[in-house]
Image (cartoon, helix red, strand yellow):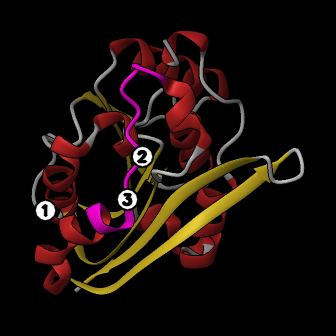
Amino acid sequence: MWNRGGGPAYPHEKVVQFVFRHFPLVVRAQKRFLDLGCGSGVHTVFLARERFQVCGVDISPVGLEHTRRRLAIEGLSADLNIGSVEAVALPDASVDAVISVGVLDCAGPNLFAPALSELGRVLRPGGRAMLLFASDTDFRVAAAGNTGLHGFTQSEVEHAFSPLQSMYSEVFMDRYITTYRNREIEQNDHLITLLKR
């Protein structure tokens, strides 16, 4: 349903910060970036515009079609493929960076650990990743009802990362919290940043 509406018009500010903090303009054309769960392509287009070699993977053909249209409008290109978070059709150690925004909470707890393992498989040594997904205290989890959005507890996140710790030289488990209406409503996301050994 989200992809049928075309998705957001602008990239998430945390994606913009991640890109500008870690990837100077002079190195971008040599870097291959995976948008894992690219949806309707807002981040794929942003990354292509910023001169990266971009791969977009999503489970939704509708989302990928929106992404193709967005890229075509701007005269940009990316390698787009149907796939899921736990089965990415890319070779081992084939990307320099991965982003995944609002995807792991949709995939749910059963695919969380396999997705993290797959992310580690496709990242090159020295590669970076940024993952943003809902926590259990996020207002969208309760509002989602039975749509399947899963809010992850801190212990679920730590438990899933525990067997993968040796794969990374940096694992930062932060939160990105935004409140609305005098803090009556809280958007509370896990913000995970990784650096592969």
Q: Is residue 59 magenta?
A: no
Q: Please identify, in this view, whether the residue under mark 2 or under mark 1 is nearer the observer.
A: 2
- Three-letter amino acid code at the position of disc 1: Arg
Decide which of 37, 81 is in the foreground and name it: 37
Residue 151 image label? 2
Q: Which residue is mark 1?
A: 121
- Residue 34 in picture, x, y percent from top left: 36, 51
Question: Main SS type for the magenta part?
Answer: loop
- Three-letter amino acid code at the position of disc 3: Thr
Residue drawn at x 47%, y 22% is 145
- Residue 152 in picture, x, y percent from top left: 37, 53
Mark closer to the chain start, 3 or 1: 1
Helix, strand or loop for disc 1: helix
Residue most toward the right? 182
Helix, strand or loop for disc 3: loop
Decide which of 159, 119 is in the foreground and name it: 159
Q: Which residues are magenta?
A: 145-156
* Image: 66 above or below 189: above
Residue 153 image label? 3
